[in-house]
Each structure stands twice: as structure tokens, then as C-alpha cells.
């Protein structure tokens, strides 16, 4: 859909410019380097770093290092944690089975089928299967805004079929990442059948 007049076009340009200055997963945060490893280069993929105390860390393809205060700094650190020998041993990863763990992003997942809608699956689980479902969204998520999630629920299913919807105040795209205490309280109440 394209703007039909100049005023609308200018407003849309202004909106897109402002949106580009924040993280779409959590609009209260400034943009940062996204700490995912780029496409794997063919050469030099086996470089190693000895991290002290006998811990070997593979660093063939470390992600770009974001500023310390950036939320993606934790993603950056996860690369080194997941590739530490002590972590791999604790997780039972057999030597030689996985050369290196890297954070993926949407473009990296090899899949052959894309489901246009999961509505029928939700309906089968809640209405037909009798299972309860908790659907939640962070209210600061510009990737999948909570109003869109709420509209999807209203359009496809009614609340009388074991589905509970809630919005996490201050939450982003992955709400527990940004508001862990609120999400824990939400889940604890829901799993015990208490009001949210």
C-alpha cells in the first residue's frame, strides 16, 4: 500500500525515519549492532582461542562486538559461552558433531515449507483438544505489535475456548528478555489457573 497524497507520504517517511533510530524488537532502546554471525567464510573457520583455566573457545566466526551497554551485547557473549568446551561438555555435545555454535537470524534458517497461517493448529489445540493457551505480547514490540496479536485472536478465535491473551507492559519482541519478572509472574499465575 502506497500513500495517496503528499501529506500522507511525508508522515510515513517521518515515521520510518524515527523507527530506524530505535530497535524494532524494543522501541525504547536505540539501534545497536545485531550480534549474529555473518555468513560463514570458507577460510579460517577453525581458529581457536585458549580462554584460560583449560577452557577452549572456538572463535572462527565471532559476531561483531556491539557497545557494552547495548542489549545485543548479551547475544555477543552467548557466542563465546556456547562455544566454550565446559559448556559443550555440560550440554553433552559430542566432539566433532557440531563445529561451532552461532546465533542464527531469519535469513539463515534452511526450510522448505512456509506456513501462511497457524490458526488451524491453535484452534485444534484449544477448541478441539481442550488445552489452555497463553498468548502474550510485549507492548513495546514493533516487529509483532500487541494490537496485531490481539486483533488476530479476536478475528480467529473467541476467548471462551481456553485461550488467554495478555500484554506485557515494557516488554519487547521477546518479552521475557526485557521483562523477566513480569513474565515469570504472568506465567506462574496462568499455570496455577489464577487471574493474571
Image (cartoon, rainbow, N blue to C red):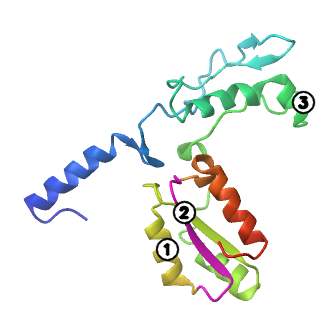
- Foreground residue, 73 or 166? 166
Classify 184 as above or below 34: below
- Residue 161 position, x and y percent, is 66, 87
Q: Quadrant of the N terminus?
A: bottom left
| Residue neighbourhood size for the residue with mark 3, other residues' Cα within 10 Å, grouped as few (<14), some (14–19), many (≥20) | few
Q: Quadrant of residue 49?
A: top right
- Residue 127 position, x and y percent, is 69, 87
Q: Secondary structure at mark 1?
A: helix
- Residue 132 position, x and y percent, is 73, 78
- The answer to whether residue 20 is left or right of residue 9 is right
- Residue that numbered label 3 is attached to: 89
Q: Quadrant of the C terminus?
A: bottom right
Q: What range of the chain is rendered magenta? A: 159-172
Classify 71 as above or below 64: below
Q: Secondary structure at mark 2?
A: strand
- Foreground residue, 4 or 25? 25
- Foreground residue, 152 or 119? 152
Q: Secondary structure at mark 3?
A: helix
- Residue that numbered label 1 is attached to: 150
Res 94 visible:
no
- The answer to whether residue 84 is left or right of residue 165 is right
| Residue neighbourhood size for the residue with mark 1, other residues' Cα within 10 Å, grouped as few (<14), some (14–19), many (≥20) | some
- Residue that numbered label 2 is attached to: 137
Classify 98 as above or below 26: above
Residue positioned 86% across, 12% down in the render: 53
Measure how far apart labels 2 and 3 are at the Cα level.
35 Å
Amino acid at each position: 500500500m502506497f500513500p495517496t497524497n503528499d501529506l500522507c507520504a511525508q508522515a510515513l517517511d517521518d515515521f520510518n525515519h524515527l523507527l530506524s533510530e530505535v530497535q524494532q524488537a524494543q522501541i525504547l532502546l536505540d539501534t545497536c549492532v545485531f550480534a549474529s554471525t555473518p555468513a560463514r567464510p570458507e577460510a579460517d573457520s577453525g581458529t581457536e582461542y585458549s580462554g584460560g583455566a583449560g577452557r577452549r573457545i572456538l572463535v572462527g566466526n565471532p559476531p561483531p562486538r556491539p557497545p557494552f551497554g547495548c542489549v545485543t551485547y548479551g547475544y555477543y557473549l552467548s557466542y563465546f559461552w556456547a562455544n566454550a568446551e565446559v559448556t559443550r561438555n555440560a550440554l553433552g555435545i559430542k566432539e566433532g558433531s557440531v563445529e561451532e555454535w552461532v546465533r542464527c537470524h531469519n535469513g539463515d534458517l534452511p526450510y522448505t515449507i512456509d506456513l501462511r497461517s497457524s490458526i488451524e493448529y491453535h484452534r485444534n489445540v484449544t477448541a478441539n483438544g481442550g488445552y489452555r493457551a497463553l498468548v502474550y505480547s510485549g507492548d513495546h514490540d514493533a516487529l509483532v505489535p500487541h494490537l496485531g496479536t490481539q486483533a488476530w485472536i479476536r478475528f480467529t478465535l473467541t476467548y471462551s475456548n481456553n485461550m488467554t491473551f495478555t500484554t506485557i507492559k515494557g516488554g519487547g519482541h521477546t518479552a521475557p528478555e526485557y521483562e523477566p519478572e513480569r513474565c515469570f509472574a504472568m506465567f506462574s499465575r496462568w499455570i496455577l489457573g489464577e487471574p493474571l
